[in-house]
């Protein structure tokens, strides 16, 4: 009789717990409302809005040159690619002819940004699954890119280097040498990444088969970037809708079919190799010419709707501008990759453990200001 | 059996990882990238394009190059720059002429986007290298960039 009473005390029941907004594994102010049963996750509900700055509304107030610097603050790890997206949208609307030099430099800096972003992600990914060493190694290599950015653009994170019509300044004389130095350096360090983390048994046990996303679900949830490509969904904007100088370089689209956390990890590692190869192809033959085309001091887009998408380090960033012919956009909408990738978190995390949720979130590579804007 | 093979694999990958970290442990002096920041302030050199704060260079004769055209004020997305201008008498022609009274720069609102310096037609303002801007009172971050009694350099507007 007593045994039965004891058992009823330990009845399984669901309960609710907050993860965030001040949780180190959410990489920012993301709050997840978890419904859990023991350690099994029943439901994940993201709660957004903690870092909402109404960037889209501020864009309606600003001129087209001023909008660019706001996009630095969305996905700050691929700031330069965000800038490029707005500039391309404005340039396409104005039907400006952009010099080849600008296109090539934009591509090189975009790929360097991607490597820097993936370096940070790799370090943080290791830290999330309990390997602190990777954090320092990832940041060491990112530091070199940050120095290149600082020398050429003037800032390390929020560069604001692109302007509608080209680049704010020409590249620094040291730029080419420094990039070559970095490529040579990073080629010796990437195999080290594999030795340190990829082949590690503990890491593989934490990631293989965790958070599986099928190809159909990836498409229906609007996944893009490495998350979509790890599920076998070929969605690389650089490949399918080339912009800037991506049509003249050869690179492989990193594709895997497993769709689990480990596949997303491997896709990003392969992307770093591909980015290195793109930089190598372009760095030796940057065309001579102007670094900027003169535009009107007050840019007025013709009446109409314009859309431009680019591939950031996280996936597809879309910029949708509605213009009524004035100096400000009537409406500007950003289709951010992080928001779509977060939406599938509930789908892939349910049924797993809390520890798996941390590993899954790490490979979704969420940047919260990008989600909230 | 998998129990023992797991232990073997675990130790093997542990040693593989340790060989990477061990290499850096032995050769740490060569690859160190960290800077001893407050101690190296005397020798610390920022990059020439580094965006620390907006400054207005003055010559030894206390002359600046700002004509008060207010293009930077219009270009600024945040209202960081505020130009208080006046009409002075041009000594050469004797006519009234626009001149700056105070070039107010609110550093606390500045996002270092560089649009003001990009748009300035006379190179009157440029980037300063100072980045140590922490203060106890936010109001001290509002600065007047033109020095007291400074005048416009001759020939800037031509």
Image (cartoon, coloured by chain):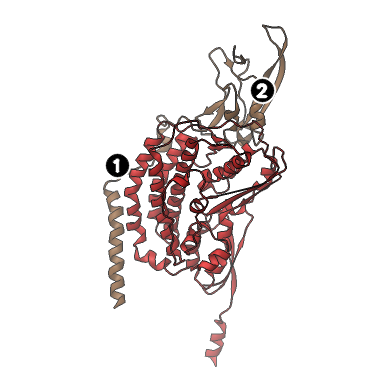
Give the residue at x 58% y 62%.
A343
> Does A74 appear above or below B147?
below
Q: CA distance from mark 2 to mark 1?
A: 52 Å
Q: Quadrant of residue A17?
A: bottom right
Residue B8 in which image quadrant: bottom left
Residue drawn at x 27%, y 46% as measured from the top left: B27
Q: Report x, y in % for residue B26.
A: 26, 48
> Can I make out residue A344 in this image?
no
On screen, B34 above or below A263? Answer: above
Q: Is residue B115 left or right of residue B130?
A: right
Q: Earlier in the sequence, mark 2 or mark 1?
A: 1
Residue A189 vs residue B146: left or right?
Answer: left
Residue B153 found in image quarter = top right
Q: Can you say which quadrant of the picture contains the N terminus of chain A?
A: bottom right
Badge 2 marks a residue whose secondary structure is loop
- Whether residue A61 is visible here, answered yes or no, is yes
Establish if A310 lies above or below A19. above
Instruction: Nearest to the eye among marks 2 and 1: give it.
Output: 2
Hue used for the chain lettered A: red
Label the brown chain with its letter.
B
x then y, percent, for residue A254: 43, 57
* In the rendered image, residues at marks 2 and 1 fall on the same chain: yes
Dot 2: chain letter: B
Picture coordinates of residue A73 (x, y %)? 57, 45
Circle number at residue B69: 2
Please give the name of the residue rendered at 57% of the width and 42% of the height, measured from the top-left corner. Answer: A88
Classify mark 2: residues with Cα within 10 Å, few (<14), some (14-19) or many (20+).
some
Element marked by disc 1: helix
Q: Disc 1 marks which residue?
A: B30
* x and y percentages locating residue B50 in the rendered image: 49, 33
Within 10 Å of disc 1 (Cα), the crowding (few <14, some 14-19, many 20+) is: few
């Amino acid at each position: 009789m007593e045994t039965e009473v004891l058992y009823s005390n330990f009845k399984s029941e669901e309960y609710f717990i907050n993860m965030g907004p001040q949780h180190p594994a959410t990489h920012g102010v993301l709050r997840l409302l978890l419904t859990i049963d023991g350690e099994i996750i029943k439901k994940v509900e993201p709660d957004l809005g903690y870092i909402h700055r109404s960037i889209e509304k501020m864009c309606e107030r600003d001129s087209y040159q001023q909008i660019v610097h706001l996009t630095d603050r969305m996905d700050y790890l691929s700031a330069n690619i965000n800038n490029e997206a707005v500039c391309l949208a404005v340039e396409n609307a104005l039907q400006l002819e952009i010099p080849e030099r600008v296109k090539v430099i934009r591509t090189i800096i975009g790929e360097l940004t991607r490597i820097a972003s993936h370096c940070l992600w790799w370090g943080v990914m290791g830290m999330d699954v309990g390997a602190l060493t990777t954090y320092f190694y990832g940041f060491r290599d990112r530091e070199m890119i940050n120095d290149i950015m600082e020398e050429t653009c003037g800032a390390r994170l929020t560069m604001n280097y692109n302007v509608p019509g080209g680049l704010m300044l020409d590249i620094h004389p040291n730029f080419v040498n420094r990039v070559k130095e970095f490529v040579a350096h990073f080629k010796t360090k990437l195999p080290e990444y594999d030795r340190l983390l990829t082949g590690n048994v503990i890491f593989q046990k934490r990631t293989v088969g965790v958070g599986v996303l099928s190809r159909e679900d990836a498409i229906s949830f609007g996944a893009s970037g490495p998350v979509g490509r790890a599920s076998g969904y070929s969605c690389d904007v650089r490949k399918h809708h080339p912009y800037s100088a991506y049509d003249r370089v050869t690179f492989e689209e990193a594709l895997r079919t497993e769709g689990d956390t480990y596949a997303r990890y491997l896709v990003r590692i392969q992307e770093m190799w591909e980015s290195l190869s793109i930089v190598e192809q372009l760095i030796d033959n940057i065309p001579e010419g102007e670094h900027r085309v003169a535009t009107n001091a007050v840019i007025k887009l013709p009446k109409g709707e314009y859309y431009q998408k680019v591939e950031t380090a996280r996936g597809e960033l879309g910029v949708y501008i509605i213009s009524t012919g004035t100096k400000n956009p009537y409406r500007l909408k950003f289709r951010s990759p992080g928001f779509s990738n977060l939406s599938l978190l509930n789908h892939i995390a349910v049924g797993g453990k809390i520890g798996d949720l941390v590993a899954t979130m790490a490979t979704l590579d969420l940047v919260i200001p990008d989600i909230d804007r | 059996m998998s129990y023992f093979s797991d232990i073997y694999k675990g130790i093997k990958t542990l040693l593989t990882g340790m060989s990477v970290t061990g290499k850096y442990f032995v050769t740490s002096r060569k690859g160190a990238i960290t800077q001893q920041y407050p101690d190296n302030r005397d020798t610390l050199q920022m990059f020439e394009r580094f965006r620390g704060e907006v400054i207005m260079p003055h010559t030894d004769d206390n002359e600046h190059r700002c004509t008060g055209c207010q293009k930077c004020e219009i270009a600024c997305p945040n209202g960081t720059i505020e130009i208080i201008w006046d009409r002075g008498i041009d000594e050469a022609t004797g006519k009234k002429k626009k001149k700056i009274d105070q070039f107010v720069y609110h550093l606390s609102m500045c996002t270092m986007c560089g649009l003001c310096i990009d748009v300035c037609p006379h190179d009157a303002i440029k980037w300063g290298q100072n980045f140590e801007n922490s203060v106890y009172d936010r109001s001290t971050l509002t600065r007047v960039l033109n020095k007291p009694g400074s005048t416009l350099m001759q020939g800037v507007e031509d």
